[in-house]
Image: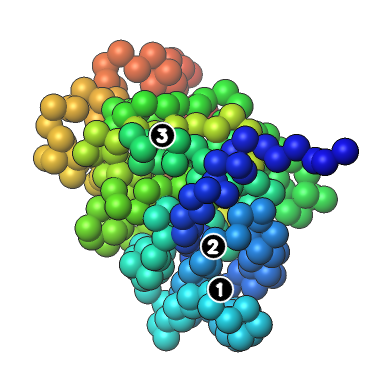
C-alpha cells in the first residue's frame, strides 16, 4: 500500500520557500554538532543554515569550516575574530539570512523531525501571521537527557502584539519561526546586549501581524550549567535588566499600551526580588498595585520580621 503524504507536506511541495535556520553559538562544540545534525535531518530540503560563532576557543570554528566544506552551498558561516556578545552575534546571523522565513535555533538545542515543514505550511497558509512557535520539551543534558517539563504545556498564547508585550518571551526562541519581510530594519537592538529577542519578536507584530502556535512538541531545549538564560548567571541578571529597559523603550514607542507594559514591569521586578528583596517587590507593586503575588510575598516577609523570603 502506498504511504499517505501528510497534508502539510503536499502543500509545501508546491511552494517550497527558502528557510534560513539561524544559529548563534559560543563555545558549544560539545552540543553544536548534534544541533546541526537535527537540522540536516529535517524532511524539508530548501534550507540554508546560517551560523554565527562569537569567537569560540573550543574548536567550534574549525568544525564549522569542515561542515561548510562537506556541504557546499548549504552553510553560511560567520566567524567573529573577537567576542562581541549575544546581540551582535544574533545580528550578524540575522542579516546574513536570505530565506522567506527564519527559524531560530540555539547552538545547544535540537529540532525534531517535521518542525520546519509544519511551520512553513502554517505560515504559507496564514499570510497574516508573522511569527509561529511550537511546544518544546525541556531536557537536562547531564541527567540522561531526562525531560523536565514541556515549555508551553500550561501557557501558550496567540494573537497580536499585545500578547507579546504582556506575557514576554513565552515563545521559546528555538521554537520560533518569523517572516523575514516583517523583521525590524535594524534587526536586534544592540542597546540590549543579552535579552534583545523580546523586542525583536514584538517588532515582528508591530505592523499588525499575528503570532501563532502549533500545539506539538517539535523541538528540544537543553538545560545545562552554561545556559545564557539561567536566571542565576551573569547573563541571566543582565537579561532581566535588558527586559526592564525594553519596557522603558516600549513606553516611548507604544504609549497606548502603557497598562500592558506596566503589567510586564511588575512581573519583571518581582523576578528580581532575590537581588534586592523589598525594593523590587515595592517596584513590582508600584507598576501594578493589584499584583496579589507580590503583595503576599512582601506581607509574609514583613510579618516574619524579614526572616522569610520566597
Residue at label 1?
74
Q: Residue 56, how many percent across, how many down? A: 53, 78
Please tell me whether mark 2 sits on a helix, a strand or a loop.
strand
Q: CA distance from mark 1 to mark 3?
A: 27 Å
Q: Is residue 92 left or right of residue 21?
A: left
- Please determine whether, in this image, residue 142 is positioned above or below residue 30: above
Q: Which one is in front, 302 or 288?
A: 288
Which numbered tag is attached to residue 137? Answer: none
- Please determine whether, in this image, residue 198 is positioned above or below residue 295: below
Does the CB distance between marks 1 and 3 fall below 8 Å?
no
Residue at label 3?
126
Q: Earlier in the sequence, mark 2 or mark 1?
A: 2
Q: Please rate how many residues cluster around mark 1, counting C-alpha atoms within 10 Å: few if below 14, some from 14 to 19, many from 20.
A: some
Q: Is residue 99 left or right of residue 205?
A: right
Residue at label 2?
47
Q: Which one is in front, 266 or 14?
A: 14
Give the residue at x 49% y 77%: 77
Q: Please rate how many residues cluster around mark 3, counting C-alpha atoms within 10 Å: few if below 14, some from 14 to 19, many from 20.
A: few
Is residue 204 in view?
A: yes
Q: CA distance from mark 2 to mark 1?
A: 7 Å
Q: Earlier in the sequence, mark 1 or mark 3?
A: 1
Q: Which one is in front, 110 or 212?
A: 212
Give the residue at x 56% y 73%: 74
Q: Residue 78, how many percent across, how many down? A: 45, 78
Quadrant in which the N terminus appears: top right
- Which quadrant of the structure image shows residue 214? top right
Amino acid at each position: 500500500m502506498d504511504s499517505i503524504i501528510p497534508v502539510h507536506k503536499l502543500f509545501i511541495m508546491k511552494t517550497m520557500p527558502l528557510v534560513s535556520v539561524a544559529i548563534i553559538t559560543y563555545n558549544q562544540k560539545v552540543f553544536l554538532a548534534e544541533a546541526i545534525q537535527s537540522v540536516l535531518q529535517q524532511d524539508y530540503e530548501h534550507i540554508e543554515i546560517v551560523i554565527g560563532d562569537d569567537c569560540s576557543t573550543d574548536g567550534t570554528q574549525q568544525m564549522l569550516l569542515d561542515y561548510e566544506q562537506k556541504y557546499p552551498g548549504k552553510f553560511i558561516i560567520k566567524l567573529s575574530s573577537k567576542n562581541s556578545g549575544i546581540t551582535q552575534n544574533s545580528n550578524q546571523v540575522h542579516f546574513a539570512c536570505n530565506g522567506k522565513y527564519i527559524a531560530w535555533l540555539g547552538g545547544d538545542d535540537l529540532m525534531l523531525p517535521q518542525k520546519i515543514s509544519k511551520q512553513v505550511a502554517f505560515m504559507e497558509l496564514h499570510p497574516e501571521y508573522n511569527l509561529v512557535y511550537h511546544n518544546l520539551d525541556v531536557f537536562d543534558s547531564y541527567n540522561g537527557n531526562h525531560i523536565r517539563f514541556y515549555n508551553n504545556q500550561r501557557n501558550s498564547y496567540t494573537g497580536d502584539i499585545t500578547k507579546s508585550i504582556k506575557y514576554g518571551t513565552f515563545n521559546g526562541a528555538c521554537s520560533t519561526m518569523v517572516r523575514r519581510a516583517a523583521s525590524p530594519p535594524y534587526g536586534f537592538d544592540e542597546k540590549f546586549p543579552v535579552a534583545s529577542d523580546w523586542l525583536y519578536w514584538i517588532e515582528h507584530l508591530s505592523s499588525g501581524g499575528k503570532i501563532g502556535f502549533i500545539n506539538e512538541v517539535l523541538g528540544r531545549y537543553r538545560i545545562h550549567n552554561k545556559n545564557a538564560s539561567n536566571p542565576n548567571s551573569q547573563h541571566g541578571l543582565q537579561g532581566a535588566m535588558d527586559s526592564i529597559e525594553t519596557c522603558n523603550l516600549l513606553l516611548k514607542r507604544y504609549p497606548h499600551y502603557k497598562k500592558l507594559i506596566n503589567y510586564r514591569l511588575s512581573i519583571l521586578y518581582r523576578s528580581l526580588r532575590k537581588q534586592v528583596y523589598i525594593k523590587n517587590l515595592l517596584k513590582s507593586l508600584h507598576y501594578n498595585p493589584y499584583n496579589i503575588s507580590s503583595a503576599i510575598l512582601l506581607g509574609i516577609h514583613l510579618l516574619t520580621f524579614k526572616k522569610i523570603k520566597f
